[in-house]
Image (cartoon, grey):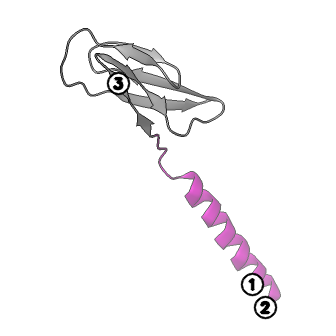
Amino acid sequence: MKTFTKLLLFLLFFLAINEAKAQAPSAEFTYPRSGLTANFNITYPEANTTYAWDFGDGNTTTGSNPSYAYTTEGIYEATTSKHTQ
């Protein structure tokens, strides 16, 4: 019975670890702005991670906290993706 209990605990532990690894990555950012300039800030930057930004007007950059000056007023969908090295 002890062997069965140990095996069951091991399987539960293994499943819990794999479930945690399978969660989708998430990133949050804020974008305080002044005029046409937006300062994008990753809320929880991670070590060994690069960030790719798309500012929604055809321009892109990398870095965790870029500043970007739009050339015209408008509504833009800025997005970021993270790549862990």
Task: Name the outermost residue toward the top.
Answer: 71
Mark 3 residue type: Arg
- What stretch of residues is rendered in magenta? 1-27
Q: Secondary structure at mark 2?
A: loop
Q: Is residue 32 left or right of residue 27?
A: left
Would you say the residues marked 3 and 2 are in contact, meaning their CB atoms lie under 8 Å apart? Answer: no
Mark 2 residue type: Met
Check the image and report above or below for 37 versus 64: above
Q: Which residue is mark 2?
A: 1
Q: Is residue 1 left or right of residue 11?
A: right
What's the CA distance linking mark 3 and mark 2?
A: 64 Å
Badge number at residue 33: 3
Task: Name the outermost residue toward the left.
Answer: 74
Residue 39: image quadrant is top left
Q: Which residue is mark 1?
A: 5
Between 1 and 73, the one nearer to me in the picture: 73
